[in-house]
Amino acid sequence: MHIAQTADYTVFLCTYQGSTYCLPPLLKPGLKPDALLQQISDYFHQQNKPAVFRAVPRGMLPLFSPDRYRIIPDRKVWDYLYRTKDLIELPGRKYQQKRNHINRFRQYYCFSYHSLQPEHFPACRRLFAEWAEEKGDHPEVEAERMALDEGLDNFSRLQLKGGVLEVEGEIQAFAIGSRLNADTALVHFEKANPAFSGIYSVINQQFIANEWADTRFINREDDMGLPGLRQAKERYHPLRMIEKFIVVEVPS
């Protein structure tokens, strides 16, 4: 990743799997983006390529003229937004299955929740490796592995918070997140040993209840286009999806 920054803007230029793209530029309030977008386009043109922007939120789409750019929904990176209270209390009939999972887990297993500490990091890496092995050679999984390593290596510096479930004396689940703003927390990672039925429901509820009860919303990020992960996140009944788009310059 390359970063260009001035008092008026910040631009992130990324290369992933051989493709180069720009993340949505961060602009000083009131700044007109035309000149900056032209600078970005000029950079891509020097590489004989059209300008490409990824993860563009719907609110930024008006910055891109439809005469010059093609806008493509990128469903696999849409974020899932939930009410914090719903994830803790699991109210009503629509959460009955989640409550059943948790009750059965409590009935069959002796467990305890702990806020994540450095001594838990090896167990987190182990659990992730076991989860990744089942997914096969998937580029998004490898990208998540790199992100986890970066997060654990810089846990305090990045102001992350996490939690683990100790089941029958061994760490069998973990979750890691951070605060986006006063109202919203992000859940970046959530992995568990599926041999323990209901464990994902428990770590999700325990992590939110113990670390983020002072927020109004939980953003559980995207599903990477993985069908199983998409189904799991949809079953928590998101308040809404945070849509993101790919914006591609149309050759003139």
Image: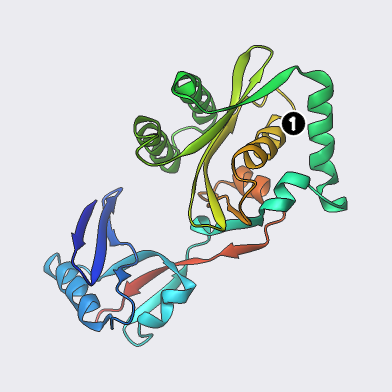
Specify how the rendered protein is coloured.
rainbow
Rendered image quadrant of residue 174: top right
Taking the view exactly as shown, the residue that stands out farthest to the right is 93
Image quarter of the C terminus = bottom left
140 sits to left or right of 110? left
Taking the view exactly as shown, the residue that stands out farthest to the bottom is 67
Judge whether residue 235 can be spotted in this image: no
- Image position, residue 50 (x, y; %): 24, 71
226 sits to left or right of 16? right
Along the line of sight, which residue is nearer the eye, 3 or 78?
A: 3
Q: On the image, numbered disc 1 is attached to which residue?
A: 198
Residue 173 in the image: above or below residue 73: above
210 sits to left or right of 179? right
Residue 94 in the image: above or below residue 28: above
Image mark count: 1
Q: Residue at x 78, y 46 (%)?
A: 89
Along the line of sight, which residue is nearer the eye, 98 or 246?
A: 98
- Image position, residue 122 (x, y; %): 45, 19
Q: Residue at x 67, y 41 (%)?
A: 209
| Amino acid type, residue under disc 1 in the picture | Gly
Q: How many other residues sit within 10 Å of disc 1, few (<14), some (14-19) or many (≥20)?
A: many
Judge whether residue 170 can be spotted in this image: yes
Along the line of sight, which residue is nearer the eye, 128 or 220?
A: 220
- Image position, residue 196 (x, y; %): 71, 23
Say what secondary structure mark 1 lies in.
loop
Q: Residue at x 65, y 49 (%)?
A: 233
- Image position, residue 167 (x, y; %): 67, 18
